Every structure is written in structure tokens, then in C-alpha cells.
Image: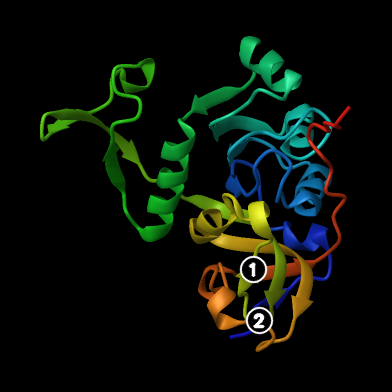
């Protein structure tokens, strides 16, 4: 079944409304759907709940949505590269749910697989476990964690075909496959759109069943922190 090929990034995100929950692929600035994020910034949609590993940096990625006060709540695992994030949290302007990185990945994977919750040893005995269910299995305590789903998932892939099958490039794969599976509507920003049959079936990372729309575009691919050898 052919998927919707959006003619513009603005059109691709026009169904995302105020108070939507969105998942966004990427790790730091690697593999982020940067053009879809820019389109959301232009749309001025507000009161978003965003689920992503981190919130970009001050001047790029999800940091732009944060700067525009378009995010009400952030669910992620790492926030260390964003001063505006820190300022909003300390000022009480942003609700934050911090989750260990492995637990975040599993919560998203579980949501995409239709698993409502699971137990993990990560977080037991820490503030994360306060008020939460803890059970003992074989003498070890485990913390109950709920799966995560989103109204919309925004992902980035190196290649995609018109059936919605996606291939990611090396570490840009990161959170993208699991996020693609956990959204009610998944929109993929691809660097190259190809015809059905051009992708090797054995090398497809996200099957098209998880994807509802695609758009082709080029990315700046900014480097989060450039370090050069002396």
C-alpha cells in the first residue's frame, strides 16, 4: 500500500495540534528529523508533550520548540546540552519526566509492541521509585514502568520507499525504529525517496506498516559538539 508523500514539511505536520503528544527520533543532533521540527516551530502549535532522548541544543532541533515555549512537558533521559531547558525547569515553566536511557528505550519499544508495562531493576531505591509499584522476583526488586505511545511520531531515515519501508544510516538509527512503531501516526523525513523494490528487504529497519507519511528533504546535519585533534 502506497503511503502519503507530503509535498512540504509544513503540510506534513499540519495535523499536529495543540496538546498533542509527539515522539521525536534522534540522539543529540544525530538522526533528528530537523526539517519536520522546523515546520512545527513555524506552525506555532503549543502545549506539546514531547518524548525524545533529549531536547536538542539551544539553537537547533527540539531546542527551537523549547525556546518558543511550545513544549509543556518533556519525557527524556538527557538534558545536559541545553541551557534554556535548565532555565525553564528551574523557573517552573516546563514539566520534566527524567527516565534512565535504557528504560526510556524499553518504554517506547513496549508502547510500540502493545505492552502496557514491564518491570526493570533500573531506578529501584532512587527517587524514581517513590510512589511507584515495586515487586520482588527471585529475591531482586523491580520497578514497574509503563509503555509509552504518542499521537504522532517524527523520525528521520537515510532512505525510504513509497511503501513506507525505512533504512537508517549507522548511528542515526538510534531511537528512530522504536519511535516509528510507537506513534499512532508516523511521519518519516527521508534523505532519499526510492521506488518499491529498490531497498533490500533484508536490510529494512522499519517496515512500512508503521509509517503513514513520508517527505524527502536535505538536512544540515549539524555537529552537536565539534572536537578536533591537536
Please, is residue 139 above or below residue 168 in the view?
above
Is 134 positioned to the left or the right of 36 in the image? left
Residue 159 percent across, percent down from the top left: 72, 70
Residue at 58% x, 69% y is: 211
User: Which element type, helix, strand or loop, lies under badge 1?
Assistant: strand
Residue at 63% x, 34% y is: 54
Residue at 70% x, 51% y is: 31
Residue at 28% x, 25% y is: 132
Residue extending farthest bottom: 197
Is 189 positioned to the left or the right of 47 in the image? right
Residue extending farthest left: 138
Q: CA distance from mark 1 to mark 2?
A: 8 Å
Let me know if residue 39 appears in the view. Answer: yes
Q: Which residue is mark 2?
A: 199
Residue 79 percent across, percent down from the top left: 63, 26
Q: Are marks 1 and 2 in contact (CB under 8 Å)?
A: yes
Residue 172 percent across, percent down from the top left: 67, 53
Residue 167, labelled with which disc? 1
Residue 14 percent across, percent down from the top left: 73, 57
Which colour assignment does the render follow? rainbow
Please tell me in which quadrant of the rendered image residue 137 appears: top left
Mark 1 and mark 2 lie on one chain; the one further toward the N terminus is 1
Residue 48, labelled with which disc? none
Amino acid at each position: 500500500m502506497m503511503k502519503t508523500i507530503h509535498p512540504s514539511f509544513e503540510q506534513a505536520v499540519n495535523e499536529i495540534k495543540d496538546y498533542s503528544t509527539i515522539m521525536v527520533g534522534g540522539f543529540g543532533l544525530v538522526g533528528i528529523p530537523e526539517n519536520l521540527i522546523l515546520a512545527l516551530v513555524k506552525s506555532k502549535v503549543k502545549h506539546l508533550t514531547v518524548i525524545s532522548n533529549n531536547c536538542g541544543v539551544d539553537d537547533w532541533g527540539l531546542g527551537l520548540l523549547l525556546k518558543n515555549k511550545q513544549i509543556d512537558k518533556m519525557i527524556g533521559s538527557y538534558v545536559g546540552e541545553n541551557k534554556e531547558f535548565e532555565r525553564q525547569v528551574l523557573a517552573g515553566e516546563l514539566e520534566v519526566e527524567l527516565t534512565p536511557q535504557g528504560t526510556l528505550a524499553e518504554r517506547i519499544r513496549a508502547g510500540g509492541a502493545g505492552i502496557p508495562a514491564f518491570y526493570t531493576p533500573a531506578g529501584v531505591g532512587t527517587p524514581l521509585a517513590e510512589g511507584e509499584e515495586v515487586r520482588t522476583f527471585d529475591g531482586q526488586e523491580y520497578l514497574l514502568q509503563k509503555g509509552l505511545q504518542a499521537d504522532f511520531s517524527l523520525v528521520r531515515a537515510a532512505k525510504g520507499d513509497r511503501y513506507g519501508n525505512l533504512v537508517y544510516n549507522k548511528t542515526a538509527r538510534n531511537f528512530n525504529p522504536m519511535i516509528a512503531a510507537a506513534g499512532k501516526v508516523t511521519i518519516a523525513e527521508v534523505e532519499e525517496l526510492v521506488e518499491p523494490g529498490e531497498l533490500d528487504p533484508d536490510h529494512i529497519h522499519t517496515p512500512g506498516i508503521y509509517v503513514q507519511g513520508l517527505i524527502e528533504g536535505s538536512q544540515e546535519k549539524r555537529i552537536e559538539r565539534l572536537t578536533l585533534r591537536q
